């Protein structure tokens, strides 16, 4: 079982180029291409901000190629990517083909594109159906992901697109194309009030499940912390993955773990993350 992690959290401390290098040296097999800085979104005003990041400019493919080569020079590949969000923002959706191009250029096999949290499976199918022909041209699969909302009165998460195994399956099966698959966010699935548990969702998804976002939480909030630091039962998660014959990467999205790290400490943090991912991989390999 191969391991990977996102480049967003480390990249915002040391830059994406250095992040890919350090992820390799920390012991990961691959890197997850976070493309959030392609579109910087003001959540309060609901608008895109001015942005001079290379992914937002005309030479975005050159930047993707550069990251790919850094990875290859250090012995790792890009396994998947993550498009910016929220999907309900039409301006952000206009960048999704660029995301697919960048994924292909970096060598990634899957691009995670969130569903619109508040749209039905039928409405989200329209978004994915528009993108799939271009995804096929790029040779990159699209993965939808389980989302959540928040109920202020109950002080817990509430249903959003793909939050349950049944709705997740409905999203994928309505499109009915091998280029739309599932990325299960383990932390989202374990949040109180919305999902029906990661292990249950794994069994419901079956072979549709081809990518993961792995992180830990208190089974209440979306903490995105390093595995084995909080309350998720990873033994049951790994067992379920083994039972369905999961063959993708173990990709971490513990992006809050490095929050506040100084540049000189990022490598140590990445080594901790790599050790947690390797522990999960060994659990999977040893599961009968």
Image: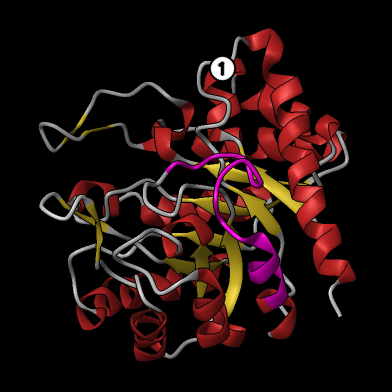
Which sits in the foreground, 161 or 237? 237
Q: Is 232 included in the stretch rendered in magenta? A: yes
Identify the image quadrant of the N terminus: bottom right
Which sits in the foreground, 106 or 279? 279
**Picture residue at 53% right of the left edge, 33% below the top:** 8
**Picture residue at 86% right of the left edge, 80% below the top:** 288
Dot 1: within a 10 Å radius of its alpha carbon, few (fewer than 14), some, or many (20 or more) residues? some
Left or right, residue 261 beside residue 3: left
Give the image location of residue 94, x and y in percent: 28, 52
Q: Quadrant of residue 75?
A: top right
Give the image location of residue 99, x and y in percent: 46, 51
Image color mode:
secondary structure
Give the image location of residue 152, x and y in percent: 13, 49
Q: Is 204 included in the stretch rendered in magenta? A: no
Q: Quadrant of residue 276?
A: top right
Compared with residue 193, is residue 77 higher up or lower down, i.e. above or below? above
Tell me which secondary structure the magenta stretch mostly adopts: loop
Which sits in the foreground, 255 or 38? 255
- Pointer 1 residue: 13
Give the image location of residue 226, x and y in percent: 62, 40
Which sits in the foreground, 155 or 2? 155
The answer, for residue 179, to whether it is visible in the render is no
Mark 1 secondary-structure assignment: helix
Left or right, residue 29 beside residue 12: right
Q: Which region of the structure is painted magenta? A: 223-239
Compared with residue 154, is residue 270 higher up or lower down, i.e. above or below? above
**Picture residue at 24% right of the left edge, 68% below the top:** 159
Left or right, residue 183 beside residue 262: left
Compared with residue 49, is residue 213 higher up or lower down, i.e. above or below? below
The answer, for residue 206, to whether it is visible in the render is yes
Q: Quadrant of residue 7?
A: top right
**Picture residue at 30% right of the left edge, 59% below the top:** 148
């Amino acid at each position: 079982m191969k391991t990977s992690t996102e480049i967003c959290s480390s990249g915002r401390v040391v830059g994406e180029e250095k992040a890919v290098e350090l992820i390799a040296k920390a012991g990961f097999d691959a890197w997850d291409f976070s493309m959030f800085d392609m579109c910087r979104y003001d959540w309060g005003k609901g608008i895109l901000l001015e942005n001079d990041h290379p992914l937002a400019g005309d030479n975005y493919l050159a930047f993707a190629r550069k990251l790919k080569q850094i990875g290859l020079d250090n012995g790792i590949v890009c396994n998947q990517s993550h498009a910016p969000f929220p999907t309900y923002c039409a301006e952000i959706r206009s960048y999704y083909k660029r995301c697919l191009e960048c994924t292909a250029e970096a060598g990634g096999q899957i691009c995670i594109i969130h569903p619109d949290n508040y749209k039905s499976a039928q409405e989200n199918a329209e978004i994915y159906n528009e993108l799939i022909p271009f995804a096929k041209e790029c040779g990159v699969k699209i993965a939808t992901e389980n989302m959540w909302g928040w109920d202020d009165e109950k002080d817990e998460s509430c249903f959003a697109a793909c939050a349950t195994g049944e709705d997740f399956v409905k999203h994928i099966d309505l499109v009915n194309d091998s280029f739309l698959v599932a990325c299960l966010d383990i932390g989202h699935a374990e949040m109180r009030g919305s999902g029906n548990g990661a292990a249950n969702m794994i069994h419901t998804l079956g072979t549709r499940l081809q990518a993961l976002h792995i992180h830990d939480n208190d089974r209440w909030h979306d903490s995105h912390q390093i595995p084995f630091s909080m309350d998720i039962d990873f033994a049951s998660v790994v067992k379920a993955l083994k039972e369905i014959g999961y063959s993708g990467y173990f990709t971490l999205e513990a992006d809050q773990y490095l929050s506040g790290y100084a540049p000189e400490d990022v490598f140590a943090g990445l080594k901790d993350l790599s050790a947690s991912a390797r522990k999960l991989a060994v659990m999977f390999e040893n599961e009968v």
